[in-house]
Image: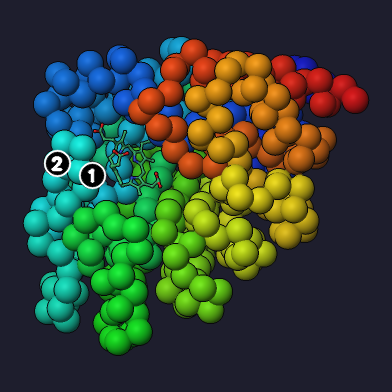
Amino acid sequence: MTMSDLPSHDRYLRALRCEPADTTPVWVMRQAGRYLPEYRATRERAGSFMGLAQNPEYACEVTLQPLQRFELDAAILFSDILTIPDAMGLGLSFAAGEGPQFARPVRHASDVARLAVPDMDGELRYVMDALRLIRRELDGRVPLIGFSGSPWTLACYMVEGRGSKDFATLKTMCWSQPKLAHQLLDTLARAVASYLIAQAAAGAQALMIFDTWGGLLGPAPFREFSLRYMTQIVARLQADPASRELPVTLFSKGATAHLAALADSGCAGLGVDWTIDLADARAAVNGRVALQGNLDPAILRATPEVIRREVRAVMDSYGNHPGHVFNLGHGITPDIDPEHVKVLVDEVHAYGRQLREQ
Ligand code: CP3
């Protein structure tokens, strides 16, 4: 088979295995989201964000919306990382314009002791039903990504009870009650591993762990409170027949200093934010894992010419090597013109072909 015969639906999985493909695969974090008018319309019908996420038909509909507009190389389950704490009984709500909130945050030893791994066929069944439906509707067009938050990032929200700049409440717990923090993180690591194994069994073809707040930690605490638990999860996924074959991508935002340590976790790929050139990120991991990233999402506010130029700069930095999954360095924001996303996706594919001919 020559390279041009490779089916496009394979690009994303090939890149994660560091195998050559006809061009660079691309998907966009938060690709199903508020920048799309059709997403806002479905959300309106669903009544709320959780109403949307917990209804498999709605979740399937919005998962597929960006694929109808753009030639994306992967679909990502429409859901949220906070489904696990919600299923643990913390009472999740999204107040308009305020982000997530928990009615019952985790503060005391008794709160941590009460937490149990949720039933994947019970409280979280809606996630698995959505995955089964999306796989059926995708019909092999592109692979489907399942995901979870990392234990550290979930704990940030669970202990704080809401979003925060520094998640000082959990950080205080780490230094004043380290045993309690570890007990919480250990429960979460078991929950996340079961959740991702169940997602694999329900049809996810690749898995991603969002460690959005890993970058709040210095090197030693990062290894102790964040990386250690993600490494445990990767090992559990590799030991289970349902998830063994699935590539796992870890994304610790703001953690470019820890890329080499992250590459030792056993993951297939690492998400990279825009604060490092991909050439340097690739050198840091010694080409051992695939890299996903890393255009600054703010560049999508610029003109199409600037977007194309910056897309090429990211791709030039990675160079003509296998193992690059193009993405933003963090989620797309609601203010972006969908036409600019089309410019990005089409430029990645066109320039990826050009790079391979050099
Ligand atoms: O990427 C995708 O398209 C899949 C869907 C997805 C959502 N959230 C949908 C969502 C994914 C992968 C997430 C992950 C997530 N959720 C993370 C990790 C990635 C990251 O962005 O750092 C985090 C930290 C959360 C927690 C969360 N959920 C926050 C802080 C918020 C509110 C902030 C905001 O952007 O409004 C959410 C809500 C949320 N999750 C929305 C979407 C599309 C917006 C809610 C709405 O429609 O009103």
Q: Does the residue tagged 1 have its C-beta within 8 Å of any atom of ligand 1?
A: yes
Query: Residue 253 or 122: which is nearer the viewer?
Result: 253
Ligand 1 visible in quadrant: top left
- Residue 336 placement, left or right of 304: left
Q: Is residue 34 above or below residue 164?
A: above
The image quadrant that residue 135 belongs to is top left
- Residue at horizontal 10 percent and vertical 62 percent from the top: 104
Query: Residue 191 or 44: which is nearer the viewer?
Result: 44
Colouring chosen for the image of the structure: rainbow
Q: Which residue is mark 1?
A: 99
Q: Is residue 264 above or below residue 95?
A: below
Q: CA distance from mark 2 to mark 1?
A: 6 Å
Q: Position of residue 112 (x, y in %)?
A: 19, 74
Residue 122 in sight: no
Q: Is residue 185 above or below residue 313?
A: below
Q: Is residue 96 above or below residue 189?
A: above
The image quadrant that residue 316 belongs to is top right
Query: Which secondary structure, mark 1?
Result: strand
Query: Residue 355 or 119: which is nearer the viewer?
Result: 355
Q: Position of residue 168 (x, y in %)?
A: 30, 70
Question: Contact, CB < 8 Å: mark 2 with mark 1?
Answer: yes
The residue carrying pointer 1 sits among few (fewer than 14), some (14 to 19) or many (20 or more) residues within 10 Å by Cα, namely: few
Q: Which residue is mark 2?
A: 95
